[in-house]
Amino acid sequence: MNVIRAKTAGFCMGVSLALQKLDSTLHEKGRICTFGPIIHNPQVLAAYEKQGVVCVRSASELQKGDSVIIRAHGIPRQEEAQARASGAVVVDATCPRVKKAQTSIAQATRNNEILLLFGEAEHPEVRGLISYAYGQAHVFNCRVELENFHLAENKPYVLASQTTQDRETFLQLKRILRERFRKLKVLSTICDATRSRQEEARDIAATVEVMVVVGGRQSGNTRRLADIAALSGIETMLVESVDELDPKKFSKKSRIGLTAGASTPKSLIDAAEIWLASL
């Protein structure tokens, strides 16, 4: 079996930095907490849980003497303020690209401009991003949702995106909005690493018979890699581990593509590649 593995598969810079910050606190006294799951990968989270790391969902769960690491996706700024007021030691492990997006949104909307954010409304990164907007904020995940908003033509708008969204779709939406609104400011908030992963997934999917994407199902960037591969018209499988793969699905296949989300450990990608190559 010929396996074409994406060079960009696996941990991105933001995930690596977040886990390094968490690892550096494991020797500290007191409880070690993460504010929300630090990344979206069940195996990684389970490993830290075994080491005693506690995942809290609100600042009310924190105690003086705790060390709390802010998740890679970031958190709403109001929740960060509450965490710092709790008496816990706060370590900010927000991805630098997400932090830059937060800052850019705050600066671009300082005069109460209306934010139009391309992203998943319930995703933790998105909840954090819109908390930095000084004016109104509208979140949409597709063109149809955007067109359902009743937006005044003469208002000032700021267009931004969740850092892991599809760049091609964002550019299409930008063109549509530029034709509609004269007062439109556009922020470049899609991560370069995300763009590279998506482009490589498209390229590989165009040359193989089936695509395997490894990563947590809660991971937005992993789901988008699977969506992009599927648009090539080939069968695409999103799995959290090699145990979910069925050999029967690969019968009469000779060329398989393999990629993984930004929060997927190398060990899981290696295991998938070995299993596929052995068929």
Image (cartoon, grey):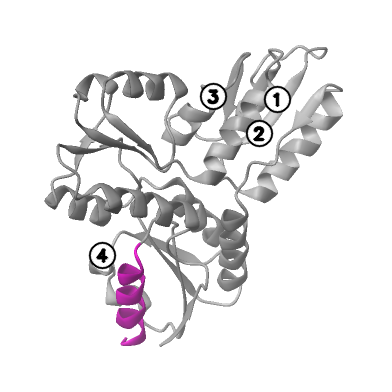
Whether residue 123 is visible here, answered yes or no, is: no
| Residue for badge 3 | 130
Query: Is 250 situated left or right of 104 in this image?
Result: left
Mark 4 and mark 3 in contact (Cβ < 8 Å)? no
Question: How far is mark 1 from mark 3, CA to CA?
Answer: 12 Å
Kind of residue at badge 3 = Ile
Judge whether 62 appears above or below 163 on screen. above
**Which element carries disc 4, helix, strand or loop?**
helix
In this rendering, the count of numbered labels is 4
Residue 207 location in percent, x, y? 59, 77
| Residue for badge 4 | 244
| Residue for badge 2 | 160
> Residue at left 59%, top 67%?
200
Question: How far is mark 2 from mark 4, CA to CA?
Answer: 36 Å
Q: Bounds of the magenta span? A: 265-279
The nearer-to-camera label among 1 and 4 is 1
Judge whether 109 appears above or below 192 on screen. above
- Residue 276 belongs to the span the image colors magenta: yes
Q: Earlier in the sequence, mark 2 or mark 1?
A: 1
Kind of residue at badge 4 = Glu
